[in-house]
Image (cartoon, rainbow, N blue to C red):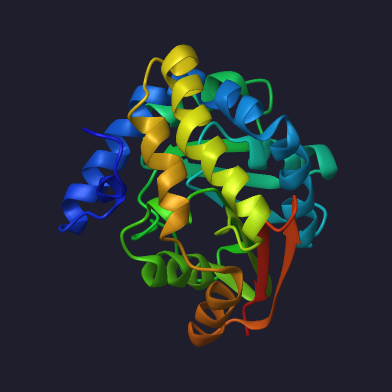
Amino acid sequence: MKNHLHLVQFRDPVEKARYVRRMFNRISPRYDLMNRLMTFGQDIRWRKIAIAKTALPRGGRLLDIACGTGDLARASLVRHPALVCAADFSERMVALGAKKHREHGEICFMVADGLSLPFSDSTFDAAVTGFSLRNVVDIDRFIGEMTRVVKPGGKVVLLEITPFRQPVLSAFMKFYFQKIVPLIGGLIAGDREAYTYLPQSVEIFLPAEKLADKMRQLGLVEVGYQLLNFKTVAIHEGTVP
């Protein structure tokens, strides 16, 4: 595929879901390393902030959906004891996460689709996801499922890159994401195509304020968000009524 925006404009949701699953299975061995390189290690701090916003009670239950290799899940356990389920529809990501965190028995890794979670209503005290929403085919359903499985009064927290809004910074970030990141992805992960798709997906994603509106429309209350990293990263939170 060529380096054009049409990479993220799939006509068929099923086609996009298949593409995304295959892509994450391919890049799984270098996924964590690429996250550190692309964000200059700042993604570790963002995850800590996101976990703090879950307000998870000690010994509570947390769902980390679209978990990748489980870094959000691990960040929760570092904060305080909890029962954590880490789920992703990429089989290789789940396998790597389980291996990476095998000494932490409190994390249960499983393969699951965020659009149809295999959990009963009100199972968890909080649900969190990181850098996943740009890749799902139905954001409403994804957030709706997160909301469904969280108990009333619990938190739904979303960590995501947000479209760049400052003109000068936007020009720099677009150059970095469109030119430098694919180059690094090709050299380090051996997959320039994946790291062309991932940065481009930011450009057509919802701005932070519109994502907050969507959360309210889906029934969440006390919705708010925090912008980080020169307003290029947003952490949204909402409470299940």
Seen from the viewer's position, the closer of residues 140 and 98 is 140
Q: Position of residue 146 (x, y in %)?
A: 50, 65
Q: Which quadrant of the figure has residue 215?
A: bottom right
Total marks placed: 0
205 vs 213, left or right, is left
Q: Quadrant of the N terminus?
A: top left
Identify the residue at horizontal 60%, vertical 69% (top origin): 208
**On screen, residue 228 above or below 80:** below
Identify the residue at horizontal 31%, vertical 49% (top origin): 5
Is residue 232 shown to the viewer in this render? no
**On screen, residue 110 above or below 241:** above
Q: Quadrant of the C terminus?
A: bottom right
Is residue 38 shown to the viewer in this render? yes
Seen from the viewer's position, the closer of residues 34 and 3 is 3
**On screen, residue 233 above or below 208:** above
Q: Position of residue 96 (x, y in %)?
A: 49, 22
Q: Position of residue 138 (x, y in %)?
A: 33, 65
**On screen, residue 182 above or below 29:** below
Q: Position of residue 201 (x, y in %)?
A: 41, 50
Identify the residue at horizontal 74%, vertical 46% (top origin): 46
Identify the residue at horizontal 77%, vertical 61% (top origin): 53
Q: Which quadrant of the figure has residue 100?
A: top right
Seen from the viewer's position, the closer of residues 4 and 112 is 4
